[in-house]
Image (tube, rainbow, N blue to C red):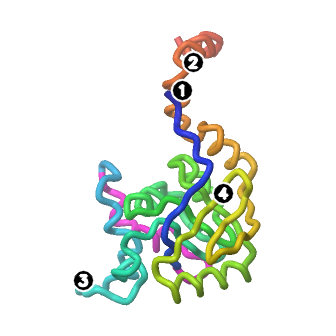
C-alpha cells in the first residue's frame, strides 16, 4: 500500500506571527539528539514558550484555547535556516496537519511534504486578515481544498497556491516515497538490476 491521498485538510486555526521564523526557533538544536521523533511535539517553539527557569511565557502554543488546533497560520519565509527535518516532525507531533503562510523555505516545505503536511501559500494581506480572525475567534474552523487550491473560513472562499509537484504528490498519494517503494517491490527489483553499482 502506498500513502493515502490527501485532497483536503480541516481544523481549528492557530496563528504564529513573524517573518523568517527559522527551524531553530521551531525546535531548538539541543533536542536534535533524540534517537526517534517521538515526543518532539512538546518542544515545539520551546525557547519562545518558556523562560530559562522553565516558566511558561505567553505564546499561542501555550494558550489553552488553541490546544486542539491543527491548521497553523504563519507569515513569510517560515522554516528558514538549517534543513533539520525535526522541525516539521515536532509541529506534526504537536498536532499540526497543514500550514498556511505567505511563503516557506524550500527545504522545510519539502520536509513537510514527506510527512503529508500541506504547505499552502496565500497573499501577505490575506494572511494578516486570517491571522487577525483566528486570534479574535479562537476555535475558527479552516478548510483547505488542495485540489481546488482554496481555503474556506468565516463563510468565504479564498484562492491560494500550492506548488504543482506538491499538490500532485498529495492528491495522488505519492508523497511518502518510502511507502511508494514498499508498495512496488517488483519494480524496485527490476530497476536495481539495471544499476551497475547495486549487486
Residue at coordinates 70% horizontally, 66% vertically from top-left? 121
| Neighbour tally class for label 3: few under 14, some 14-19, many 20 plus, Cα within 10 Å | few
Magenta region: which residues?
16-34
Q: Nearer the viewer, mark 1 or mark 4?
A: 4
Q: Please name the residue that numbered disc 3 is placed on.
A: 54
Mark 1 → mark 4, Cα distance in angstroms:
27 Å
Mark 4 vs mark 3, foreground winner is 4
Q: Is residue 23 magenta?
A: yes
Disc 4, disc 3: CB below 8 Å? no
Q: Which residue is mark 2?
A: 188
Residue labelled with disc 4 = 145
Q: Are marks 4 and 2 in contact (CB under 8 Å)?
A: no
- Left or right of 71? Residue 102 is right
Residue 181 disc label: 1
Locate residue 195: give its quadrant. Answer: top right
Q: Is residue 186 left or right of residue 120?
A: left
Q: What secondary structure is the stretch in magenta mostly built from?
A: loop
- Which of the two residues, 27 or 172, is positioned nearer the viewer here? 172
Mark 1 and mark 2 lie on one chain; the one further toward the N terminus is 1
Say which element carries label 4: strand
Q: Earlier in the sequence, mark 4 or mark 3?
A: 3
Which dot marks residue 141? Answer: none
Helix, strand or loop under label 2: helix
The x, y position of residue 53, in whole percent, is 23, 86
In which quarter of the view is residue 19 placed?
Answer: bottom right
Q: Is residue 197 magenta?
A: no
Amino acid at each position: 500500500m502506498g500513502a493515502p491521498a490527501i485532497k483536503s485538510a480541516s481544523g481549528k486555526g492557530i496563528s504564529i506571527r513573524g517573518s523568517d521564523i527559522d527551524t531553530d526557533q521551531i525546535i531548538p538544536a539541543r533536542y536534535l539528539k533524540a534517537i526517534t521523533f517521538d515526543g518532539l511535539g512538546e518542544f515545539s517553539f520551546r525557547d519562545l514558550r518558556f523562560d530559562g527557569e522553565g516558566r511558561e511565557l505567553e505564546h499561542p502554543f501555550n494558550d489553552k484555547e488553541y490546544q486542539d488546533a491543527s491548521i497553523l497560520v504563519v507569515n513569510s519565509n517560515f522554516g528558514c535556516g538549517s534543513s533539520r527535518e525535526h522541525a516539521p516532525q515536532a509541529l506534526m507531533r504537536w498536532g499540526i496537519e497543514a500550514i498556511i503562510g505567505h511563503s516557506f523555505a524550500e527545504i522545510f516545505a519539502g520536509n513537510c511534504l514527506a510527512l503529508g503536511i500541506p504547505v499552502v501559500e496565500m497573499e501577505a494581506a490575506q494572511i494578516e486578515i486570517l491571522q487577525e480572525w483566528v486570534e479574535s475567534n479562537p476555535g475558527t474552523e479552516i478548510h483547505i481544498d488542495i485540489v481546488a487550491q482554496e481555503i474556506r473560513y468565516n463563510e468565504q472562499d479564498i484562492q491560494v497556491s500550492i506548488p504543482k509537484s506538491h499538490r500532485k504528490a498529495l492528491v495522488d498519494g505519492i508523497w511518502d516515497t518510502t511507502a511508494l517503494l514498499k508498495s512496488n517491490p517488483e519494480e524496485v527489483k527490476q530497476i536495481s538490476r539495471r544499476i551497475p553499482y547495486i549487486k
